[in-house]
Image (tube, rainbow, N blue to C red):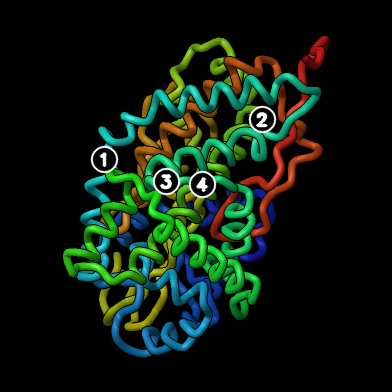
């Protein structure tokens, strides 16, 4: 059977193992992504990942033994809430939740807030660079991502760090895991539910935001109130954790590929195309959530059994040389789309258009308003997670001769 792939023991740099697995045959049996799932088939090539994400027999919770197992762990607040979100639902419920939100998350709607994004990012970078040091996560990425969320959702977020602390704690409920769900994640989830309920009851919901659209679905009888709460919490989590991680990863990549950093610093590539390649090279989400086979079927010559977990490895697919010639190198002039960073098929990321622009705005602000500042790699702190890949701390140091204002 060969050596089982173990996603939990790859350290801070899993990419060499991803490359080895791609070369060895594109798929591999591996350890369970969750105790309830059992041994899984992991997919490493771009073709296999794309096919699995679109496969009609690979679901979040098909009828049968796995659905029963999922119902048991739904006694945990965090997991129960997320099963009601668009992320962990199957058709037809997924489409009922997705359609009204997708209508508010188009490239055009993202473009309408881009100038505000750029202005806010510029102000944050300019203020941060007045001192003797600052943190790219704390001082730039987190406040910008919550500014964006406030605009997208259409509700004020007056204390972003209180929400950030809870979404960070909630990560463990959605992460791949060896054991049970961390009780802290349940506590965090309850606090986020309370925040979402208060945001609605305060009467400060903007008429054209995403929350207003959700509430209109309730009024029309298509959604339940709990669907609104679940999807607000989902956006609070997914709408900033991944953007923050993507920015931190991008800074590390630019420090390691000094020739590519010079291209950005000298404005030899535009911000949007640079962010696209950085997303491909250092994706913030390494694994798509496990899909469960609804029944026995053949997948590229491999028999998948009903109830078996299949885990697409997004970060590996985006370095597959069959699609991306640069592979494990960073090439800001490639001009290629990051494709599977945001998934594909039914569950493709709703916020992908906004996320791309957020990263572009952050890069522009940093390299325009904090020129010469560098990431201190010796003090970088990575988040402790398997599914998500990013930084908790990204300290920057000023160029020689810099004087604080």
Query: Which residue bears the numbered disc 3?
Result: 341
Q: Tell me if residue 170 comes above or below residue 282 in the rendering.
A: below
- The reply to whether dot 2 and dot 1 touch (C-beta < 8 Å) is no
**Spatial separation of the CA atoms under disc 1 and disc 4:** 22 Å
**Spatial separation of the CA atoms under disc 3 and disc 2:** 21 Å
The secondary element bearing badge 2 is classed as helix
The picture quadrant where one finds residue 158 is top right
Q: Is 49 positioned to the left or the right of 374 in the image?
A: left
The secondary element bearing badge 4 is classed as loop
Query: Which residue bears the numbered disc 1?
Result: 106
The picture quadrant where one finds residue 254 is top right
Toward the viewer: 280 or 119? 119
Give how far across and how far down residue 349 sits, in percent: 36, 50
- The reply to whether dot 4 and dot 3 touch (C-beta < 8 Å) is no
Mark 3 and mark 2 lie on one chain; the one further toward the N terminus is 2
Mark 4 and mark 2 lie on one chain; the one further toward the N terminus is 4
User: Which of the two discs, 3 and 2, sits closer to the camera?
Assistant: 3
Mark 2 and mark 1 lie on one chain; the one further toward the N terminus is 1
Query: Which residue bears the numbered disc 2?
Result: 256
Query: Which residue bears the numbered disc 4?
Result: 157
- The reply to whether dot 3 and dot 2 touch (C-beta < 8 Å) is no
User: Which of the two discs, 4 and 3, sits closer to the camera?
Assistant: 4
- The reply to whether dot 1 and dot 4 touch (C-beta < 8 Å) is no
Toward the viewer: 197 or 202? 202
Q: Residue furthest front?
A: 203
- The reply to whether dot 4 and dot 2 touch (C-beta < 8 Å) is no
């Amino acid at each position: 059977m060969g050596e089982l792939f173990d996603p939990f023991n790859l350290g801070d740099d899993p990419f060499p193992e991803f490359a080895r697995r791609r070369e060895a045959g594109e798929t591999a049996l591996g350890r369970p992504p969750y105790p309830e799932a059992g041994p899984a088939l992991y997919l490493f090539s771009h073709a296999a990942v794309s096919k699995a994400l679109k496969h009609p027999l690979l679901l979040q919770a098909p009828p049968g033994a796995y659905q029963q197992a999922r119902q048991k762990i739904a006694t945990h607040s965090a997991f129960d809430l997320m099963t009601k979100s668009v992320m962990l639902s199957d058709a037809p419920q997924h489409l009922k939740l997705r359609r009204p939100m997708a209508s508010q998350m188009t490239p055009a709607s993202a473009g309408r807030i881009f100038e505000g994004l750029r202005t806010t990012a510029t102000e944050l970078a300019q203020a941060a660079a007045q001192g003797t040091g600052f943190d790219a996560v704390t001082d730039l990425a987190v406040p910008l991502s919550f500014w964006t969320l406030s605009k997208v959702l259409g509700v004020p977020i007056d204390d972003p760090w209180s929400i950030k602390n809870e979404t960070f704690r909630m990560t463990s409920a959605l992460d791949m895991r060896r054991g049970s769900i961390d009780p802290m994640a349940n506590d965090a989830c309850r606090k986020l539910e309370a925040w979402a309920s208060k945001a609605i009851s305060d009467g400060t919901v903007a008429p054209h935001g995403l929350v207003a659209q959700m509430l209109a679905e309730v009024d029309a009888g298509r959604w339940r109130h709990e669907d609104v709460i679940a999807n607000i919490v989902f956006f609070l989590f997914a709408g900033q954790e991944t953007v923050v991680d993507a920015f931190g990863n991008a800074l590390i990549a630019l420090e390691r590929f000094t020739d590519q950093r010079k291209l950005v610093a000298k404005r030899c590539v535009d911000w949007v195309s640079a962010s696209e390649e950085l997303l491909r090279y250092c994706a913030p989400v390494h694994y798509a959530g496990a899909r469960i086979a609804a029944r026995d079927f053949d997948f590229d010559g491999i028999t998948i059994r009903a109830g078996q977990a299949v885990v697409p490895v997004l970060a590996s697919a985006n370095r597959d040389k069959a699609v991306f010639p640069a592979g494990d190198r960073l090439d800001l002039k490639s001009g290629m789309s990051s494709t599977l960073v945001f998934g594909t098929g039914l569950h493709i990321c709703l916020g992908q258009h906004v996320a791309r622009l957020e990263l572009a705005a952050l890069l522009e602000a940093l390299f325009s308003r904090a020129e010469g500042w560098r990431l201190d790699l010796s003090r970088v702190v990575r988040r402790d997670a398997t599914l998500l890949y990013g930084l908790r701390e990204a300290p920057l140091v000023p160029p020689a001769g810099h004087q604080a204002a």
